[in-house]
Amino acid sequence: SLLFPPSSSLPSQIKGLTTMARTVEEIQAWLVSTLAEALKISPHEINLQESLDSYGLDSAQAMVLITKAEKMLGFEVSPTLLWHYPNVEALSERLAEESLEQSSPAQDARRTNLSAVKTVSVNLGAEAVLDPNIRPRSFHFTPELNNVFLTGGTGFLGAFLIYELLHKTNADIYCLVRAENSNEGKLKLKQNLQQYAVWEEEYSPRIIAVPGDLSKPYLGLSTEGFEMLAANLDAVYHSAAMLNYVYPYSALKAANVLGTQEVIRLASDIKVKPLHYVSSVAVFESPAYAGKVVREQDSFDHWEGIYLGYSQTKWVAEKLVKIAGDRGLPITIHRPPLISGHSQTGVCNTSDFICLMIKGCLEMGYFPDVNYMMDMSPVDYVSQAVVYLSKQQESLGKAFHLQHPQPVSFTMLVDWMRSFGFPIQLIPYDEWQAQLMKTVTSINNPLYKLRPFLLERWSQEGLTIPDLYLQAKRPIISCEDTLKALSGSSIICPPINSQMFMTYSAYLIESGFLNVA
């Protein structure tokens, strides 16, 4: 999937910033006000010692904060500071120190951007250690599901998994939600399903909110609550993960890795239940797989060269699931690529990278000419496949690739938009970068927030992130076994063609996300 690693520094092309020393108090007051505005809450609700992560700051909001901070401070700021100085108090002190240094005339000759914090190299192989106390007992498969547990129900895929489980099983669905109580959690789930047009009031009693936290031991539940669930569930669906383009592995580990361990614990405790884990084709992002065909049951032992913190956590988390499988836990692993909108309704997650990129490029008038294959799979195909495969006994112990079986070139999307009169040009990536710096000056353009990831030079060769994700550097994901496993169903991945583009465009325009005027 086309995802962009955390930037160790903002691009060197961003120059011409004027610097004036700011005090801790000035920066602190500014951060509180700006953070409150981004999160649409009162400044009084911001706790100076509270972790920024606890406010649910997503990648786009983080980049808005970073780019505004640059303008206010007059020097470049590394997005990783949001992790290494994780609350307003600590971040204000660090920025004030740098502001004083940057404003000193003696610093002019050797002034650099605020990137003292470098990405720490993590041995992912050493991270893949599952709690030795997790030891599943014997298990007897039953296709009948009365109670299932789901993580990620307030996300895009999660909404459609809930929909499929409601329609394809008779089970009550216990959904882990970050909320103060079950009523607040239920409202969050309802609003998410309504947002994606899959809420049906008649099914409401079968959706039960479980207030908790993926990043906490026992999922933030009491010991009694955890054990009660463990004793009564028939299956566990784990689709939740924190996706943030700014945070490194260390910042995402608690939710994505340790959270997966707690989900494994829940599936293994008291009554053994099948665990259906939504992983990612990103587990094959190491250059070791570049140009090679990787099949569903192939091992994924190479992790060196995976840059994105999110992808690193998915590699380790799937390793934990595999270890649990070796210990006797019944598992199925589902690896989707980038998940696109619903093939029939066009409903999309408008905050995902591709939607933001398309919107930004349309506003700019230029698309980068890059050799990418669009392997996106519609969310209805992915959710239907996950639920169907999870109900087949022969799926246990296997991995599935929900990759689109017939990907198309990125230029096909551009050609299609041109045919409908969008005034856009396809230009080489380095020229596109120059245009990005020259013309995208408004924070309202999504590309303004994404500049660090589009312009940053990574790897020892000094390549940009898009260079690292060119087709020649990616594996060929085979989904042959998955298509065979789905052959007994009516589940078919819709082709990526003009009809699909039309469906998505209609939704994006109707929802107000794209403006064609």
Image (cartoon, rainbow, N blue to C red):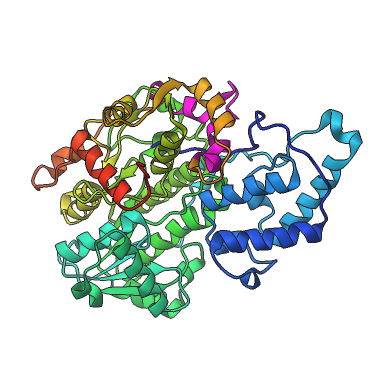
Q: Left or right? Give the position of 493 relative to 316.
A: left
Please give the range of residues in magenta: 447-472
Q: Is residue 455 visible?
A: no
> Which quarter of the figure has residue 478?
top left
- Is 487 one of the magenta-colored residues? no
- Is 454 one of the magenta-colored residues? yes
Q: Is residue 357 visible?
A: yes
Q: Which residue is at the far right?
A: 106
Q: Left or right? Give the position of 250 relative to 258.
A: right
Task: Name the residue located 43 percent from the left edge and 30 percent from the top edge.
Answer: 365
> Which quarter of the figure has residue 370?
top left
Q: Left or right? Give the position of 113 relative to 434.
A: right
With respect to residue 331, does 377 lie above or below? above
With respect to residue 509, does 50 lie above or below? below
Residue 234 in the image: state x and y as whole percent: 25, 68
Task: Name the residue located 28 percent from the left edge and 42 percent from the top edge.
Answer: 505
Residue 460 in the image: state x and y as whole percent: 60, 23
